[in-house]
Image (cartoon, rainbow, N blue to C red):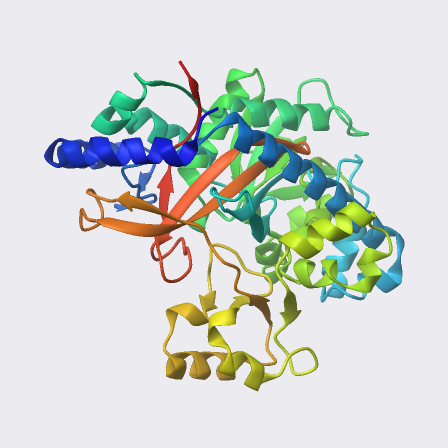
Amino acid sequence: MIDIIKIREEYEELINEDLEGNRKGALLLKDNLERTPLYYKNRFASYTVQIPRVYSEKEINLFENVVTVTYNIFNKVIEEYLNNEDYRKLFPFSKELEELILTPCGYDFKLPIARFDIFYHENTGEFYFCEINTDGTSGMNEDRIQDELSIDNPAHQKMIRRYNFSTFEMLDSWVKTFMEIYNTYDKKVSNPNIAIVDFLDGATLREFQEFARHFQKAGYNCEICDISKMRYKNGKLYSENGNVIDAIYRRAVTVDIINNLDEVSDFYNAIKDNACFMAGSFKTQILHHKYLFYILHLERTMQFLTKEEIEFVKEHVPYTVPFKEEFISLDEVINNKAEYIIKPDDDYGSSGVFAGVELSQEEWEQKVSDIYNESFICQKYVPQYESKNIDFAFGDGKWHNYINMSGLYVYGGKFAGVFAREAIAGGIIASHRNERTQPTYIVKPL
């Protein structure tokens, strides 16, 4: 039986035995990273550390079970929202968004793609959910590229001679899943034109290009489209290049679409008319919105979950409430800052998130007072797993304790891989501030 904590200790020993060699390797990796799609617009889109994330079959089996149970719960939540007006009222959605969610999409699959971010404790097997990402889910290409660049990591090169390492394949597998779902669509065509769609001025364009290449490799026409430049006429949605679009891989997150309806009116009307397939439909916003964790704990939700699912929610989903007077007092949050984290109720990329553990009492009091009764949630700050790592390329080249997050990719309701992230302990993992990503491996004996 592989012990992943022991595996990391072996990495640490190998690095300490040759600090200079590993430093040189990390700097070479950084130089090579600059020549990849992870260097974009004169900046690195991804930073890494020296020890990768490793899991054994034991952890993979656990992750598969987490995905299965969570996915079943989420299917029930979406179904309840679609069928019962009283349940819909629990979500703070606008009339326009509710109409989009209720619009028939031409297929039954409720959650084509997602990433369930969890804090997994490797020493105990415990885990807690951080957040749920749906259609804007990203990071697949980061893992692939960082695995390729591990050739520059001397410690890793020694470890692959001791153990059998394998990786997750997350590009072709998504193309396969996408097409399987598309083939259930009530207006499918035999050779669909596919578009990857987002607001391109802030998109992870190089990742889109990689996915487009994999769609094309599988024999499908695929292009990348700015959502605001698509045109809808005579019952067909067209790309800026004038091509009819039959199927959409949506990377534009719902909040951006709703906030820019005037710019995307053609796209919006095409989707309302079910003029083309879209993975995923706007039903996924039910799960992406931060109110989800609050609603999961309500008695109204417990009514349609099994006893086992109720226990799963209570054990793994952090206590969450809208950050408003009717749900939690300001004094409670101010006086117990280490117990809480505050998040915008409908944002992404760690934007606007802050935790009491990373702020002084004065800073905390000021921040929470300024946004009380606004569009935020208040969540219990759950314990996070720490492990040692070292960053020669982007950090100070010293050992630190890092907090860990495991993003469980979900394709077609099944576990598909892990997006591994770390940050120096003492706060939160924020993509715009302190995040480090790691290539992820499944490790078996040789």
Q: Position of residue 287 (x, y in %)?
A: 68, 51
Q: Position of residue 175 (x, y in %)?
A: 58, 25
Q: Position of residue 167 (x, y in %)?
A: 45, 24
Which of the pair 39/355 is nearer the observer? 355
In the image, residue 310 sits, relative to residue 438, either above or below, namely: below
Circle count: 0
Q: Position of residue 79 (x, y in %)?
A: 83, 47
Q: Is residue 388 left or right of residue 343?
A: left
In the image, residue 258 sits, relative to residue 14, either above or below, namely: below
In the image, residue 430 sits, relative to residue 4, either above or below, namely: below
Which of the pair 445/225 is nearer the observer? 445
Q: Is residue 351 left or right of residue 155?
A: right
Q: Residue at x 38, y 68 (%)?
A: 358
The answer to whether one can see residue 429 in this image is yes
Which of the pair 76/135 is nearer the observer? 76
Quadrant of the snapshot with the C terminus: top left
Q: Is residue 194 left or right of residue 362?
A: right
Residue 3 occupies quadrant: top left
Q: Residue furthest left?
A: 20
Q: Residue at x 88, y 61 (%)?
A: 85
In the image, residue 67 sits, relative to residue 264, either above or below, namely: above
The answer to whether one can see residue 153 in this image is no
